[in-house]
Image (cartoon, rainbow, N blue to C red):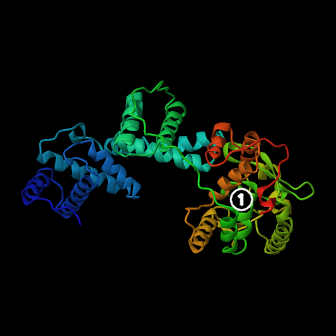
């Protein structure tokens, strides 16, 4: 429900509209924008008589795809509202149409350019799209916290206050606070070209000891039994090879080597490659899956599709690679994806959300006492290897961890001894 404006304020506002010679036909529009402005301030806890609330309001309108003309109209309406309370600002001086537009643009587009630059910097470094999504989220939260402060005025003190605010008032986790710090460090160094040095005196969120959820083989088999094709095979790979869900979905036919029973993971987390032993027990299932993909590929070729989605610039180097069989996804999406700008249809891999939804449903129907997700199978892979006395360094290599300390979290659940031979836990006898 929109906030109600006191009658006295409405009368004073009408008087100022007359003084400013606002046409009668536009006066209702001015009143509408002021109501929107007051409602915005009430909802987001901004003081309506603080001039710093205006650029935030305009920025909100811009985010809602309001036109420049509508933004200017709202801008002018709030300036009239300020006059009621004798709030004077540089904006209240007479300016040309061009100057007013530049003022609005400076508040709405100054930060807007940041996200294009952020995207470019991340792409240049070949970081994951998830990294951009995460970093841009924290930069937007920081932008909101500093109330669209001009970029050149941002300092280490702003970062310090923001991180403390996240820990004290927002009560976020230690990992989220560290993520925010890394995002702002990247933002300062690569976008603002500044170094904010050592941040001292920040209230840190307390890091709680984390022990991963681990399923037993019986629980894993129960979940797999509740899954339909192809999700049952996906979960077998997640557990059998210790894969992240994104790594599993990005497997292409050429990543499988049936002769040596080796699975190659390209561009895993941190853009690292690694090789893993394929579970012998899955050999028949995987060969059938490859045959299924082959039949689908022939249908796509007959339908004159544009190929599968490729990565980086490989398609420019090898123009026909996207239609070659060995580049096809091991778990292709059921439908082709239409690309409007190129007016063509491409084949993507199965969406991770579909897999997550299937796993969640199977876990619920299994009525387990543990909370399990797609990543739980990776935890179980590592823990079961430790239970089988695998060396921690071997497990680190199989998981693709950069630091062995990350792998050490699994020692909280089991004890291990060193052995030499590597084997998938899916091939262990129950």
In the rendered structure, the answer to whether residue 323 lies left or right of residue 414 reads right
Farthest-out residue, right: 259
In the rendered structure, the answer to whether residue 278 lies left or right of residue 312 reads right
Task: Please tell me how many numbered marks the rendered image carries.
Answer: 1
Residue at the (21%, 59%) spot, across then down: 35
Residue at the (68%, 37%) spot, across then down: 404
- Whether residue 349 is visible here, answered yes or no, is no
Q: Nearer the viewer, residue 133 or 401?
A: 401
The quarter of the picture where residue 359 lies is bottom right
Q: Position of residue 124 (x, y in %)?
A: 65, 40
Q: Position of residue 391 (x, y in %)?
A: 76, 42
The quarter of the picture where residue 13 lies is bottom left
Q: Quadrant of the N terminus?
A: bottom left
Q: Is residue 29 above or below residue 111?
A: below
Residue at the (8%, 60%) spot, across then down: 7
Residue at the (17%, 50%) spot, across then down: 81
Circle 1 residue? 239
Q: Nearer the viewer, residue 81 or 422?
A: 422
- Whether residue 325 is visible here, answered yes or no, is yes
Q: Quadrant of the C terminus?
A: bottom right
In the rendered structure, the answer to whether residue 99 lies left or right of residue 410 reads left
């Amino acid at each position: 429900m929109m906030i109600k404006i006191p009658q006295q304020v409405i009368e004073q506002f009408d008087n100022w509209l007359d003084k400013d010679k606002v046409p009668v036909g536009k006066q209702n529009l001015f009143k509408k924008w002021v109501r929107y402005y007051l409602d915005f301030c009430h909802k987001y806890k901004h003081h309506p008589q603080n001039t710093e609330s205006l650029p935030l309001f305009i920025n909100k309108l811009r985010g809602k795809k309001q036109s420049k003309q509508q933004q200017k109209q709202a801008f002018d309406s709030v300036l009239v509202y300020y006059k009621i309370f004798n709030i004077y600002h540089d904006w209240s001086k007479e300016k040309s149409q061009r100057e007013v537009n530049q003022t609005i643009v400076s508040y709405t587009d100054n930060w807007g350019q940041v996200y294009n630059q952020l995207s470019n910097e991340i792409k240049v470094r070949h970081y994951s799209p998830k990294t951009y999504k995460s970093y841009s989220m924290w930069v937007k939260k920081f932008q909101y916290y500093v109330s669209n402060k001009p970029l050149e005025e941002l300092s280490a003190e702003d970062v310090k206050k923001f991180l403390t605010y996240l820990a004290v008032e927002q009560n976020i986790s230690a990992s989220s606070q560290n993520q925010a710090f890394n995002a702002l460090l990247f933002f300062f160094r690569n976008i603002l070209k500044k170094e904010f040095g050592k941040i001292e005196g920040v209230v840190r969120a307390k890091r709680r000891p984390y022990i991963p959820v681990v399923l037993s083989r019986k629980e894993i088999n129960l979940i797999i039994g509740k899954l339909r094709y192809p999700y049952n095979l996906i979960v077998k790979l997640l557990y059998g090879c210790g894969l992240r869900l994104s790594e599993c979905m990005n497997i292409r036919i050429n990543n499988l080597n049936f002769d040596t029973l080796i699975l190659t993971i390209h561009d895993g987390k941190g853009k690292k490659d690694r090789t893993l032993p394929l579970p012998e027990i899955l050999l028949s299932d995987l060969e059938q899956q490859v045959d299924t993909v082959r039949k689908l590929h022939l249908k796509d070729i007959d339908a004159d599709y544009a190929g599968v989605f490729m990565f980086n610039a490989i398609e420019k180097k090898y123009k026909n690679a996207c239609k070659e069989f060995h580049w096809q996804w091991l778990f292709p999406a059921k439908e082709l994806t239409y690309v409007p700008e190129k007016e063509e249809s491409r084949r993507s891999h199965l969406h991770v959300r579909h897999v997550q939804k299937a796993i969640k449903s199977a876990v619920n129907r299994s009525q387990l006492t543990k909370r399990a997700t797609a990543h739980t199978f990776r935890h179980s892979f590592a823990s079961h290897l430790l239970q089988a006395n695998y060396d921690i360094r071997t497990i680190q290599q199989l998981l693709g961890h950069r630091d062995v300390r990350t792998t050490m979290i699994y020692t909280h659940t089991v004890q291990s001894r060193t052995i030499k031979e590597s084997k998938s836990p899916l091939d262990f006898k129950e």
